Amino acid sequence: MKQQRLDYNELLKVAIEEAERGRAEGGISIGGALFDGDGKLLGKGPNWSVRNEDSSVHDETDAFRNAGWQHDYRNTILVSTLSPC
């Protein structure tokens, strides 16, 4: 079975939307999203480190937290508007 080709611009749009949401809600305009290998969204989040005064709440960690526990992360794609954050 041939795997579909992912449109990385579409994946990045999700991260950009999170960056815009973060800025609108008092955070930093950085966003991230975690997808499975087929492009299914698992979790997304903005960078809340300044708003929450918590240096651990970067967009990447928020996306992972919102994705919940995954059996395996080897076939996932992390998209961020700023890398490395």
Image: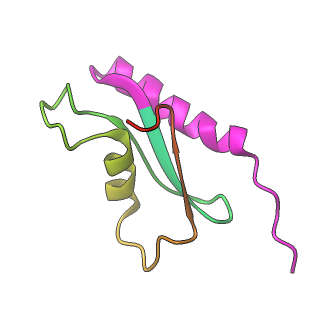
Q: Position of residue 7 (x, y in %)?
A: 76, 47
- Outermost residue toward the left? 53
- Outermost residue toward the right? 2
Q: Position of residue 17 (x, y in %)?
A: 52, 30
* Drawn side of residue 20 relative to residue 39, left or right: left
Where are the magenta residues, as a range? 1-30
Q: Position of residue 11 (x, y in %)?
A: 63, 44
Residue drawn at the location 46% of the way across and 77% of the way down: 72
Q: Nearer the viewer, residue 74 or 43?
A: 74
Residue drawn at the location 33% of the way across and 23% of the way down: 28
Compared to residue 75, the image places residue 31 above or below, namely above
Residue drawn at the location 36% of the way across and 40% of the way down: 59
Q: Nearer the viewer, residue 75 or 83?
A: 83
Q: Is 13 a magenta residue?
A: yes
Q: Is 35 a magenta residue?
A: no
Quadrant for the N terminus, please: bottom right
Compared to residue 49, the image places residue 67 above or below, namely below
Residue drawn at the location 62% of the way across and 34% of the way down: 13
* Drawn side of residue 80 relative to residue 85, left or right: right
Q: Quadrant of residue 77?
A: bottom right
